[in-house]
Image (cartoon, rainbow, N blue to C red):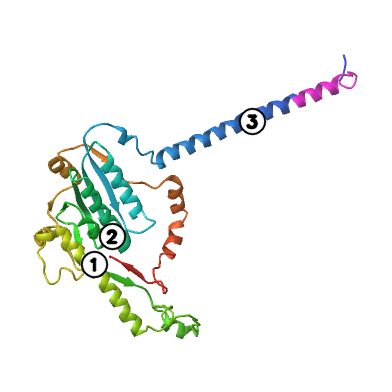
Amino acid sequence: METPQNDPQWERQLLEKIAFSTLQEQKAKRRWGIFFKLAVLAYLVAVLVLVVDWGDSEKLADGRHTAVVYLHGVIEPTGEASAEKITGALQAAYEDKGTAGIVLRINSPGGSPVQSGIIHDEILRLRAKHPDIPLYAVVEDICASGGYYVAVAADRIYVNRASIVGSIGVLMDGFGFTGTMDKLGVERRLLTAGENKGFLDPFSPQDEKQKAHARLLLGEIHKQFIEVVRQGRGKRLKETPEMFSGLMWAGSQSIQLGLSDDYGTVDSVARDVVKAEKLLDYSVKDNIAERFAKRLGADVARNLTFGLLGGGEQTQLR
């Protein structure tokens, strides 16, 4: 009987066994690696399906319908309720041959007077261009300030009894840190070319002349707001001394004051007013890059750079 020591082939056989075992182990690792890669890919595909707005498949359907555009949140240049997104959605809705009427679904506390004005003016232009397609504003929780600035461009405004409507005014807000700086022993060193270049600088004592000028600026924008409301509501408006003071009213009160017309929801207006129950949403959604950017905090950087004036003061219809 031969022992491994007497068998001249034993070393070779042992090496072959080791090599074969190693090869089998590598194959198993590759199989598991491929499995995990496919699992990750399937997960990413599932996330994309859930996150991405694939959009216009619904709009491809033929037939008469009520177009819906959602104005949600603060009206600002880079937000969901930016003038670019809202006007783009409205233009698409008007251009669709199946659109019988448009509902602007509003849930907004207001925001930029410029963005609100752009949306308002574009609604008037589109209404004049397409007189056979009515546009109705439907208020959900709140339609205040810039939101109401937009709403008055509609043919009619529908509310819920508990909706908050109004706030026809303008504000400019900011902070003053001079007292805190004095306590910390911090000295403000501000150099300007132009005596008002540091307009309402939050780290300097408030200048009464600049404060008075800011009030003139706010007064001018407020005057424009009032004129827009009067033109939009016409004889329906029952003016009171407090109507343009910045106060807000419940939906039921807003009807009595002529700030809105009647009770209604998106569904009821489509069914009973437009007479086209089928709803198609034309709202412009954020793409996947924008959604991920917001989740990673890009909106924080956006808010930090939103200051309109030198001292970080913001003028808003809110």
Query: Which callout, 3 or 1, points at the residue further toward the start of the chain?
Result: 3
**Residue on which the image places disc 1:** 224
Residue ID at (29%, 70%): 171
Left or right: 206, with 152 as reference point: right
Left or right: 287, with 272 as reference point: right
State yes or no: discs 2 and 1 in contact (Cβ < 8 Å): yes
**Residue on which the image places disc 3:** 30
Counting from the top left corner in percent of width and height, residue 90 is at: 28, 47
Crowding at mark 3 (Cα within 10 Å: few <14, some 14-19, many 20+): few
Quadrant of residue 211 within the rendered picture = bottom left
Residue type, label 3: Arg
Query: Which callout, 3 or 2, points at the residue further toward the start of the chain?
Result: 3
Find the distance from the CA under tag 3 to the CA under tag 2: 61 Å
**Residue on which the image places disc 2:** 117
The numbered mark at residue 7 is none
- Quadrant the N terminus occupies: top right
Residue type, label 2: Gly
